[in-house]
Image (spheres, grey):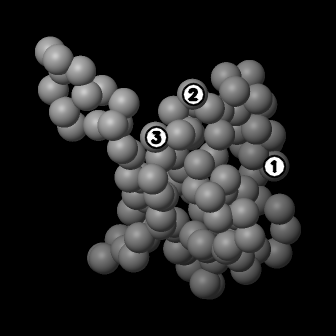
């Protein structure tokens, strides 16, 4: 979906399939939702190519529980970690439930 230093569009069929599945299952790319104008990449390859290959896809019913999402810095890997911070505890403070 997000790429840098590619000469042409990479894997258009894969991108189309991802969008199709997202639409069919009503999934959100939460990182893109929270960072609509940012260019960050989770994979680095040869010739300075970069791409955002790693995602957190969520359903809209848990979107309210997402505090933040981020793409971290990689260490000795061609992939960066993708991070998501969820807060459920305020919704489940009832007798008999464990707080997270």
Residue at image location 63% in from the left, 77% down from the top? 49
Q: Quadrant of the N terminus?
A: bottom right
User: Whole-percent x and y of residue 6?
Assistant: 76, 74
Q: Which mark identifies residue 61?
A: 2
Q: Is residue 25 left or right of residue 89?
A: right
Q: Is residue 98 left or right of residue 30?
A: left
Residue 17 visible? The answer is no
Name the side, left or right, on which 29 lies relative to 9: left
Front position in the image: 33 or 8: 33
The residue under the point 47% across, 64% down is 70
Return the residue at label 3.
65
First in sequence: mark 2 vs mark 1: 1
Label for residue 12? 1
Q: Distance of mark 2 from mark 1, alpha carbons?
A: 29 Å
The answer to whether residue 95 of the structure is visible from this angle is yes
Q: Is residue 31 above or below residue 6?
A: above
> Where 56 falls versus 100 (above or below)?
below
């Amino acid at each position: 979906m997000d790429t840098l230093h590619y000469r042409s569009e990479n894997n258009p069929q894969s991108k189309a399939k991802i969008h199709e599945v997202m639409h069919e299952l009503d999934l959100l790319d939460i990182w893109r939702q929270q960072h609509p104008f940012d260019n960050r990449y989770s994979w680095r390859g040869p010739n300075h190519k970069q791409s955002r290959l790693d995602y957190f896809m969520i359903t809209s019913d848990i979107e309210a529980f997402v505090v933040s999402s981020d793409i971290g810095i990689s260490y000795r890997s061609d992939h960066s970690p993708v991070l998501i911070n969820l807060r459920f505890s305020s919704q489940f403070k009832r007798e008999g439930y464990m707080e997270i």
